[in-house]
Image (cartoon, rainbow, N blue to C red):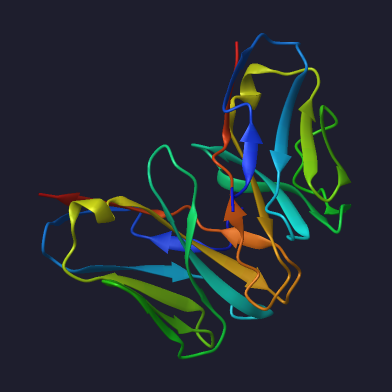
Amino acid sequence: ILNVEQSPQSLHVQEGDSTNFTCSFPSSNFYALHWYRWETAKSPEALFVMTLNGDEKKKGRISATLNTKEGYSYLYIKGSQPEDSATYLCAWDRSNDYKLSFGAGTTVTVRA
Amino acid sequence: DAGVIQSPRHEVTEMGQEVTLRCKPISGHNSLFWYRQTMMRGLELLIYFNNNVPIDDSGMPEDRFSAKMPNASFSTLKIQPSEPRDSAVYFCASSFQDVTETQYFGPGTRLLVL
């Protein structure tokens, strides 16, 4: 049972367009929210770790926001490029117990 | 830094055989995690170790699965006997218990049980 939900499951975006998608998680016992980028045939790579309500992180054209009170995070990709095509996973870290609960991911396909 | 190292990268075996997957975490990391990726269940945590001690093995499917971490630089995940439904990609990840707890994943072992 996944208590971390991501939507949509997949999306297609035209090169140059911007997009965003959602991660929902339990707001109780929150410690941190992680975003990973997972390219096909590779392993997940860490993008961001966010711990504070209202946190915003940015890495190049990718950014993320966090709302711990309502239990959601958005990931934004600005000016999508084909190399942004990947599955983006979020993971909920509760109360510092070392475990991450992963969502099923949002698979982004950028069309040239 | 070589990152998390897993071996083998691919394994094809017959039902009933023993399978051993190996992982070398990043030097200095004190937590190690074994995950399984399947289409049906996504990325699921099997077991994790902290300072070489198993902390939570509630994700281990059944008694056919076992994991050990004899020292800080090596861990194994064993399946005995293997079954076709064990076919999946198995990832090992390690982390250092700082405030971020970011996990660093190995390349995975793709297991096919015939």
Residue B92 falls in which quadrant of the image? top right
Q: Position of residue A21 (x, y in %)?
A: 33, 67
Q: Nearer the viewer, residue A89 or A2?
A: A89
Q: How many marks?
A: 0
Q: Position of residue B22 (x, y in %)?
A: 72, 33
Question: Above or below — where is B39 with respect to B85?
Answer: below
The answer to whether residue A7 is seen in the rendering is: yes
Q: Position of residue B112 (x, y in %)?
A: 58, 19
Question: Above or below — where is B81 with respect to A32?
Answer: above
Residue A78 falls in which quadrant of the image? bottom left
At horizontal 75% and vertical 36% (from top left) the residue drawn is B61
The answer to whether residue A25 is seen in the rendering is: no
Question: Above or below — where is A29 with respect to A41?
Answer: below
Q: Nearer the viewer, residue B92 or B55?
A: B92
At horizontal 81% and vertical 21% (from top left) the residue drawn is B80
Q: Position of residue A97 (x, y in %)?
A: 76, 69
Residue sitting at the far front: B1
At horizontal 59% and vertical 56% (from top left) the residue drawn is B104
Residue B7 relative to residue A22: left or right: right
Residue A38 relative to residue A109: left or right: right
Question: Above or below — where is A20 with respect to B79?
Answer: below
Residue B68 relative to residue B108: left or right: right
At horizontal 71% and vertical 39% (from top left) the residue drawn is B23
